[in-house]
Amino acid sequence: MVKRRKMSKKKKLTMTVYFLLRGLVILSLIAQGIHGNWNNVFLCILTLILFTFPSLMKKTFNMTFPTTFEIIVYCFIFASEILGEIQNFYGIFAHWDTMLHTLNGFLCAALGFSSIDILNNMDEFHFKMTPAFVGLVAFCFSMTIGVLWEFGEYTVDVYLNKDMQRDRVVEKITSKKLSEDEITPIELDGINKTVIYTNDGNTTVIEDGYLDIGLHDTMKDLFVNFIGAVVFSILGYFYIKNRDGYRFAEIFIPRLRKNE
């Protein structure tokens, strides 16, 4: 009876967070619609769709998500789309994007780890993988998701004229294009202004440096994704080695639902 009561409380907490965030998204959708911000309306609709993914995965693959993991996923989606994009937290808080990409690396590693650990414990699976191999697969899964996300950002920027890669101003560049032979790299340091002339006669002045087109942001995102993936992979490795000693990891690991 005690165990059932605890599970009920956990489910109630998850549903409370879910409906609270869902309500905030709906309010944001209404507000953006009133002001005619249709791009933001689309983001709100996308957020509502993404909110259904945990339930869809649980039903499709007969899985159960730990309360902490599921709540973090809902908060991650809300922080990324509503706070990050619509409320411009990416611009207001310098490390908002970094924090989310680090968390993404951690959560995706947990998903990859869970999938392999489930197979590893199935009787139908005819060979067992070592803890180090399971951790490596979790890491590779997370990094693959991170790379695919950066591919998506680049595609949206190129074909939809957005700036998901977050261009930034830098004061130093090194390029072989600047040399006569295009072989020897030339370094420009202390750049304080860039002037851009377009064919239609317009001029754009960039103060304090040179405009980097997404490279620094992409590499930073992949690096922090790497950190998040490594952290969970190490945690997962020790969890397999000693499940009783590292039960903390269980709050991030989805499981197959046990048959009643």
Image (tube, rainbow, N blue to C red):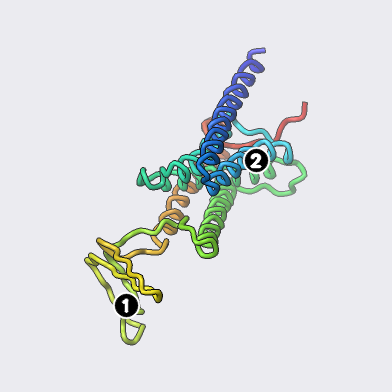
User: According to the image, label 1 marks what residue?
Assistant: 185
Q: Nearer the viewer, residue 33 or 120?
A: 33
The residue shown at (34%, 73%) is 197
Rendered location of residue 100, percent (x, y) = 46, 44
**Tag in front: 2 or 1:** 2
Quadrant placement of the C terminus: top right
Quadrant placement of the N terminus: top right
Rendered location of residue 92, percent (x, y) = 36, 44
The residue shown at (63%, 33%) is 65
**Is residue 129 shown left or right of residue 79?**
right
Q: Residues within 10 Å of mark 2 (few under 14, many from 20)?
A: few
Q: Looking at the image, is 242 positioned above or below residue 226?
A: above
Rendered location of residue 171, percent (x, y) = 27, 63
User: According to the image, label 2 marks what residue?
Assistant: 53
Q: Nearer the viewer, residue 54 or 157?
A: 157
The residue shown at (56%, 41%) is 44
**Is residue 194 shown left or right of residue 8?**
left
